[in-house]
Image: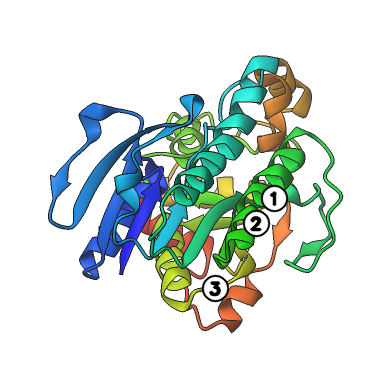
Amino acid sequence: MKVLITGATGLVGKELVAQLREKGYGVHYLTTSKDKIQHLADYRGFFWDPSKNEIDTACFKDVQAIVNLAGATIAKRWTPSYKKEIQQSRMGSLAVLKAGLAAVDDHQVEYLLSASATGIYPDSLTELYTEQTETAPKGFLAETVELWESAAREFISMRIPTGILRIGLVLARDGGALPEIVKPVRLGIGAPLGSGRQWQSWIHIEDLARMMVFSLEERLEGVYNAVGPNPVTNKKLTQEIARILRKPLWLPKVPSWVLSTVLGEMSQLLTEGQRVSSEKMAMEGFAFNYINVHQALEEILGT
């Protein structure tokens, strides 16, 4: 199998590329930077610029599956102009992919796997969300995810089966939210955020990439939650980090209003949360390597 990846040089993309190559799969990837284009036997880069509707359609040659991970980071202050960029980078990337495929008469693409996010589910302290939960998008993040998934489903009209992974909090050593969460704890000034009761549906980056490979191999269609089996509260996550780092937690919780003042609307990423089920993916036969958050954090932060 040969796989085309967008977002291959990002945090999740790098791990996915490594796992695919380790299993002997060929990788094509799209990049907006010509300096990042490589031409190896099993790893070839191609230029695209979704903002200008440009794509090198040679990227589709001999490709059987596409993994779409492209999108501007949401971990940046949500100004009105940046909100547009967050949405356009997701919908625009999928639109350019679709148009590029339509321009190729003899492509072999038979599957699309697209990233999504658990942010489509409402903030709740009590609900357990499954893929069958009916969602009525409320707020910028949920609306963005709804548009993102709708853009991915458009590939079905091209007779390309489509899978969607709603990704939770990705735990990784070298990027994402975890290093920023860990930083104040290392300095001895860590504290739960907001109420501390908000749920964090996390997944270890290794399991996330394994789940993507599994989805590609099994051609999973429809929506799946890409989270670990045991969500935790923000307070529990912070306590586990402190325990592994052997640091005290003595400061009071950081009030939501403080986070809102400092971060603006994007503070909801820290003060809101969802308890999300991974049962559907497990029923497909996927086995998690990291079952609980202590195990995951120990692998990442332990010495």
Front label number (2 vs 3): 2
Q: Is residue 36 above or below residue 5?
A: above
The answer to whether residue 249 shows anywhere in this view is: no
Q: Is residue 163 left or right of residue 111?
A: right
Q: Which residue is located at x 70 percent, y 39 percent?
A: 144
Image check: 106 left or right of 102?
left
- Asked whether 170 or 28 is in front, the reply is 28
User: What residue is shown with label 2?
Assistant: 153
Which residue type carries mark 2? Arg
Residue at position x 64%, y 68% from top?
Answer: 222
Which of label 3 and label 1 is nearer to you? 1
Q: CA distance from mark 2 to mark 3?
A: 14 Å
Q: Position of residue 223 (x, y in %)?
A: 65, 65
Give x and y (percent) for residue 67. Answer: 44, 55
- Quarter of the image where one finds residue 156: bottom right
Contact, CB < 8 Å: mark 2 with mark 1?
A: yes
Query: Which residue does the numbered mark 1 point to in the structure image?
Result: 150
- Give the spatial CA distance, label 3 vs label 1: 17 Å
Q: Position of residue 177 (x, y in %)?
A: 50, 39
What mark, if any, has residue 82 been given in the picture? none
Q: Secondary structure at mark 1?
A: helix
Badge 1 crowding class, 10 Å Cα cut-off, few under 14, some 14 to 19, many 20 or more, is few
Q: Residue at x 87, y 50 (%)?
A: 136
93 up-or-down from 149: above or below? above
As helix, strand or loop, the secondary structure at mark 2 comes to: helix
Dividing the picture into quadrants, the one containing residue 46 is top left
Residue 68 image point, x, y percent? 48, 50
Identify which amino acid the numbered label 1 is placed on: Ser
Q: Amino acid at mark 3?
A: Leu
The residue at which mark 3 appears reads as 220
